Image: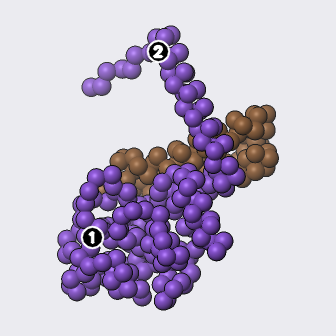
């Protein structure tokens, strides 16, 4: 049985208050440094890929371009992959692919073609600080999100949704958000 | 609570009145903290590990609450 929480002593309360104040000062400084972009980021309701359906991962057995090409008719690409397909460069340094599907069938098809691992990859962490193979992170949802068509017929999430996915994935990262806004302005 | 009591006009009016009395810098703190809470939820194993699919409605509710808070903050000019 868990022990009941002890009430904080006066000096512990004071230390907690000081920590909270220091954290708020840092946050306000970051806000000031980010400028108007911060105000645009903080007004978004973040989207997490993980909660949009059943998230599953498969290790890639081919390069990213081959995977996106093979999924062109089935998927709406999200987050970093959407950014790469729309603008030619992404947000993250890894080689993962993020996509929405309405069924897991395309995953098995790609696995049979030797493009993906047959078994699901256990690590569903979106941005891994540890090493691991490049993955397809597929969110199997009942319906595909709103999308637009870019490049050679790839469907990617709308810019509004991409902004929300970015904040949901990395928080208020002014550098990445500025990259996104600059790319969208063309 | 904002999502739970979305039909309660008196409750929302009271929240709006209270937020209107807070200085703008702190209102931005409120906005950021609410957004941080939603982002933190995505990283919480309780809400994100296998078997946590049952929490999806809770997550939707929290998103709706954040959207409502955002519109109240717009209303008070934050």
Q: Residue at image x 70%, y 52%?
A: A36
Image coordinates for residue A47, horizontal then vertical, percent? 51, 60
Image coordinates for residue A107, horizontal then vertical, percent? 29, 79
Q: Quadrant of residue A138?
A: bottom left
Res A145 visible = no
Give the letter of the chain under mark 2: A
Front residue (pair B46, A161): A161
Chain A pictured colour: purple
Q: Please say if A44 is above or below A184.
A: above
Q: Residue at image x 58%, y 26%?
A: A21
Query: Which label belongs to residue A58?
Result: 1
Front residue (pair A181, A97): A181
Q: Residues within 10 Å of mark 2 (few under 14, many from 20)?
A: few
Res B34 visible = yes
Q: CA distance from mark 2 to mark 1?
A: 47 Å
Q: Please say if A184 is above or below B52.
A: below
Front residue (pair A2, A46): A46
Image coordinates for residue A117, horizontal then vertical, percent? 21, 74
Q: Quadrant of residue A44?
A: bottom right
Give the letter of the chain under mark 1: A
Q: Residue at image x 32%, y 59%?
A: A124
Image coordinates for residue B58, horizontal then vertical, percent? 48, 52
Left or right: B34 in relation to B59: right
Query: Which label belongs to residue A176?
Result: none
Which residue is disc 2 drawn over? A12
Left or right: A34 in relation to A79: right
Label 2: element kind:
helix
Chain B pictured colour: brown
Q: Choose the circle earlier in sequence order: 2 or 1.
A: 2
């Amino acid at each position: 049985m868990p022990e009941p929480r002890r009430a904080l002593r006066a000096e512990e309360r004071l230390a907690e208050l000081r920590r909270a104040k220091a954290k708020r000062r840092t946050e306000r400084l970051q806000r000031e440094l980010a400028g108007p972009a911060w105000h645009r980021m903080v007004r978004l309701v973040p989207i997490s890929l993980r909660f949009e359906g059943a998230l599953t991962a498969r290790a890639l057995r081919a390069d990213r371009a081959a995977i996106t090409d093979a999924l062109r008719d089935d998927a709406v690409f999200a987050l970093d992959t959407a950014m790469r397909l729309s603008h030619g460069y992404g947000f993250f340094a890894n080689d993962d692919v993020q996509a929405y599907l309405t069924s897991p069938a395309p995953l098995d098809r790609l696995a049979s073609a030797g493009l993906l691992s047959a078994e699901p990859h256990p690590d569903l962490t979106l941005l891994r600080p540890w090493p691991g193979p490049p993955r397809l992170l597929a969110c199997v949802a009942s319906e595909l999100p709103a999308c637009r068509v870019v490049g050679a017929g790839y469907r990617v999430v709308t810019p509004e949704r991409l902004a929300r996915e970015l904040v949901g994935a990395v928080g208020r990262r002014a550098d990445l958000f500025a990259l996104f806004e600059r790319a969208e302005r063309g | 609570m904002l999502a739970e009591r979305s039909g309660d006009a008196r409750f929302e009016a009271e929240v709006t009145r209270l937020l209107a009395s807070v200085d703008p810098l702190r209102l931005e703190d409120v906005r950021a903290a609410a957004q941080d809470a939603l982002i933190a939820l995505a990283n919480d194993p309780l809400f994100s590990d296998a078997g946590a699919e049952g929490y999806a409605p809770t997550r939707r509710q929290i998103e709706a609450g954040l959207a409502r808070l955002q519109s109240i903050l717009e209303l008070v000019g934050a």
